[in-house]
Amino acid sequence: MTGAPAFRHTDTGTSESTWLGDPRWALAPVLDVPALAARHDELLVLAAHPDDEALGVGGLVALADRAGMPVSVVVATDGEGSHPDASAWGPDRLGGVRRLEAAAAVSALSPRAGLTHLGLPDGSLAVRRGALREAVQRVVRPGSLVVAPWSGDRHPDHDTLGAVAAEVAAERGATLLQYPIWLWHWGLPDDLPWERACVVELDRDAVDRKAAALREYPSQSSPLGPAEGDRPVLPPEVLRRAARPLELLVADGGAQPASRTSAGGAEAFDAMYEAGDDPWGFHGSFFERRKRDLTAGVLLRERYDHALEIGCATGVLTRRLAERADRVTATDVSVRALDLARVDAPEHVSWVLGRVPEVLPDDPGPQDRVDLAVLSEVGYFLRPTELLETLRRVRDALAPDGEVLLVHWRHGTQDVPLDGPLVHDVAAAALDDLPHRLHLEDDDVLVDLWGGPAGSVAEREGRA
């Protein structure tokens, strides 16, 4: 990068828990990508530099490609100015490499996509605004869905391209969406115009395509050499933000096709019990018994005041938690599951019917405080925005030194929004203000624990 942005990419930047813990994610409309594909002739992605397209909207490009939508990517500069103080690489070499990287990255997102390089000077789009405007005018058509950098991103090239795209889209009668990149680094949630925000939710395939595209930019994510000026422009903090299973865009005011339905209703889960009372195979399974033993075995306290279990099903794990807690609240979306769970259940368990996040209090009171929250085999049934809101409400209800435990199937999933590894990645980002106390994985199961009292169990008993 060149110019004088009001931030440095070497700064740590705003934490993911600050961003992902904002309640306004749950209020933003979720774009219906197949409906967008039916409405528009093409997805036209404008990028100021090679890698902007992958960082900002790589998931959208992947989903549009899967929906059969023609994709064109136009990159304004070759990004030759990203390392002005590099010890070994000059601008010519760097620009040539980044062109090759862009071709590989765009192909990873959408093998059929077209890629055009304008070759304007990196860091000088404001000076070359006239040439940039002429080039954008040549590619924008009335039926285009134009996706460009956000004009408030505080990078001079991003801001200029975003403003030009807005002007040309308005002239052509095209639809415009803008994507932030560096806002996530320098900004805070109140810096984002949430009233115009919309969200693209990514599935495993889109997340994987986006990650593959970003791996095609080693010139930006790996050192070019040993000197200070060779350091990566995309440090781990920036790449972590790009790994979210959702992307946010700022709309130009036109209504976009949106979907806010949940990933699955209670009817589907109730129907699973029509063939028997144990559709998940909890009973008689060593795998399930071992998983419950692992869940109970990693907890950091012997006793809890109030434990919350989300997605309790028939209450098999709930009974184990009830042995360790004075009070347990167990939620599930299925009426039939809770009917079975209540049979001969401990009296200090409260069974609550409802789907998360709505079943959890948005403004928890003292009676809602929990010192243990357990999400076992439930996260991948939620859409990304639902998972974020669930984690936010859990975090808000957590008592000081409270624990959040996630346990999920590690293998692939079908016909659900997410998979176990992705759920745990989201939780790691959303809960990064809590100490990460334990990570356990084997061929089948992922276990992660955040929060809890200070010190180890042995230290608290005076053994260490």
Image (cartoon, rainbow, N blue to C red):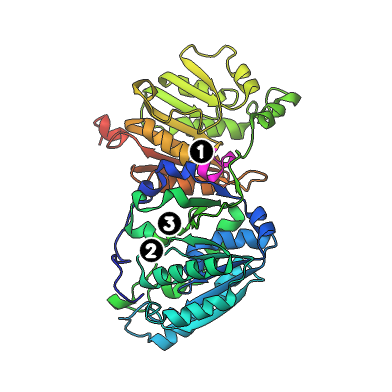
In the image, residue 297 above or below residue 136: above
Residue position for label 1? 407
Amino acid residing under circle 2: Asp
Residue position for label 3? 241
Query: CA gap, disc 3 to disc 2?
Result: 15 Å
Residue position for label 2? 153
In the picture provided, is 141 more to the left or to the right than 219?
Answer: right
Q: Where is residue 330 in the image (x, y as percent from the top left)?
A: 50, 23
**First in residue order: circle 2 vs circle 1:** 2
Q: Quadrant of residue 72?
A: bottom right
Amino acid residing under circle 3: Arg
**First in residue order: circle 1 vs circle 3:** 3
Magenta part of the protein: which range? 379-386
Q: Position of residue 387 (x, y in %)?
A: 50, 41
**First in residue order: circle 3 vs circle 2:** 2
Amino acid residing under circle 1: Val
> Is residue 442 visible to the viewer in this orientation of the structure?
no
Query: CA gap, disc 2 to disc 1?
Result: 37 Å
> Is residue 433 visible to the viewer in this orientation of the structure?
yes
Quadrant of the snapshot with the C terminus? top left
Q: What element carries label 3?
A: helix
Query: CA gap, disc 1 to disc 3?
Result: 23 Å
